[in-house]
Image (cartoon, rainbow, N blue to C red):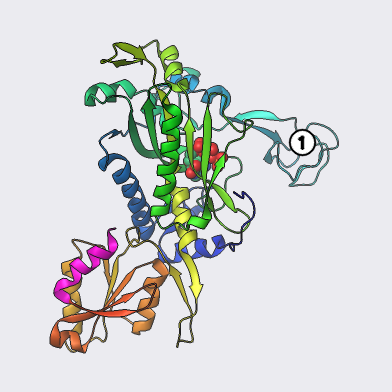
Amino acid sequence: MPESATTHPDVLEKLVSLCKRRGFIFQSSEIYGGTGSVWDYGPLGVELKKNLKDRWWRSMVRARDDIEGLDAAILMHPRVWEASGHVSGFVDPLVDCRHCKKRFRADDPRIKGEPGTPEAQCPSCGMKGTLSAPRLFNLMFKTFMGPVEDTASIVYLRPETAQGIYVNFLNVQQATRQKVPFGIAQIGKAFRNEITPGNFIFRTREFEQMEMQFFVEPGTDAHWFEYWKEQRMQWHRSLGLDPARLAFHQHTKEELAHYARAAFDIQFDFGGTLGFQEIEGVHNRGDYDLSRHQEFSGKKLEYFDQPNNRRYLPVVIETSVGADRTTLALLVNAYREEEVPGEAEGRTVLGFHPALAPIKAGIFPLVKKDGMPEMATRLANDLRPHFPVFYDESGAIGRRYRRQDEIGTPFGITVDGQSVADGTVTVRDRDTLKQERVSADRLREYLRERIEP
Ligand code: ATP
């Protein structure tokens, strides 16, 4: 599948502005000029991302009996990162400009000539011969643990959540008495001092991962790899992501990590200049991780297979998906601008899957009199313990609908004159714009059937 060509327009700039205006996503520390490539989730964004994470957790942990949940700490023993290869290997080659002090990746296409030679020109200030030769720069954030700031007290902010799973492999296995094959899943923050971050929440320095490591008997790994590849693609489709915008990308020999036996990315077409990009990695990691931790910790991490009376190190199939990057995929996928038949003004819609929408229904009295606000308020109070709903009585009804369309609310419930007389309300569908009369008593059931599949 293509990694380049996209027919979809670039909607990022519009999304950044909509997300700020409507309270999905704000720049971190904005009043101080912002923190580079760090973002805060506002009232609607936190709901959207939480719905996504809950859906992942439900499908991975709750709906299965062969995957256990975990919430490991961000700070880990520094030896973990030596064993994992991150201290020596999680590096990007960088060059510095001696004149303007800017830093670039050595493979920055804007650099003309070989960095470190008199010919090379700085892409920022334009000076010639000022770029240093490439130097390796580690992407892990470092800090100090305890009162003394010396090399012995260095700890790292984890650059991935996976290591917390590997080091707890036997703890979880013994506590739950799971038998191989089984998996461990966790959702948590990861930190990378990315040199070329950007594109809104696509690549940030602080982000959340949803990772599941599946431990299998050697020899069965090719089968499980295929299984998880398909399962994960299916899950992305279940979010309502357009199947034509999803693709597999198989890692070439050059792209494969040295320990990996096979790796596929699941890509989403973000449109514009980004095009198809990774949102999830599915990797066959062999027994690299467990054998390295066994070696560095001096503790046996072998699994004991009782029926066959043998010990072995399981092979790991990893599925690793970014919660923020997938949230961006949801936003990009959902965004559309369209004309409204019979109306002069068009509308902007976030066509989220109802299960992911931050607010499920807007509740509107048609006018602010004749018992309508009272009935609508009562309805909103009845529904609120079951779904996030939003009560709005201000302005023309068309405008109230459009404000909800713009944040992806799938249903608009209007209380009108007839409602007060016969106890029915109209339910407007965000996408088809069709209106249906539904008895207020049945409303909860009506919404549940449409929101939860
Ligand atoms: P990339 O090549 O895009 O940097 P990666 O191959 O380093 O990603 P992995 O280490 O496989 O990514 O991480 C798994 C997932 O975590 C990615 O598919 C992505 O969704 C997410 N992710 C990784 N780095 C970032 C980041 N800096 N910001 C947001 N999400 C990220």
Q: Position of residue 15 (x, y in %)?
A: 50, 62
Q: Position of residue 170 (x, y in %)?
A: 31, 20
Residue 205 in sight: no
The residue located at (48%, 49%) in the rendering is 325
Eyeballing the image, is 397 above or below 355?
Answer: below
Q: Secondary structure at mark 1?
A: loop
Mark 1 residue's CB less than 8 Å from ligand 1? no
Q: Residues within 10 Å of mark 1 (few under 14, many from 20)?
A: many
Residue 397 in sight: yes
The residue located at (30%, 16%) in the rendering is 305
Q: Position of residue 436 (x, y in %)?
A: 27, 79
Q: In the image, is residue 446 part of the stretch drawn in magenta?
A: yes
Q: In the image, is residue 388 part of the stretch drawn in magenta?
A: no
Eyeballing the image, is 275 above or below 135?
Answer: below
Please name whichever residue, 273 or 176, is drawn nearer the observer in this view of the structure.
Answer: 176
Please name the amino acid that badge 1 sits on: Leu
Residue 384, image quadrant: bottom left
The residue to which callout 1 is attached is 131
Quarter of the rendering occupied by the C terminus: bottom left
Q: Is residue 250 left or right of residue 385?
A: right
Q: Which residues are magenta?
A: 440-453
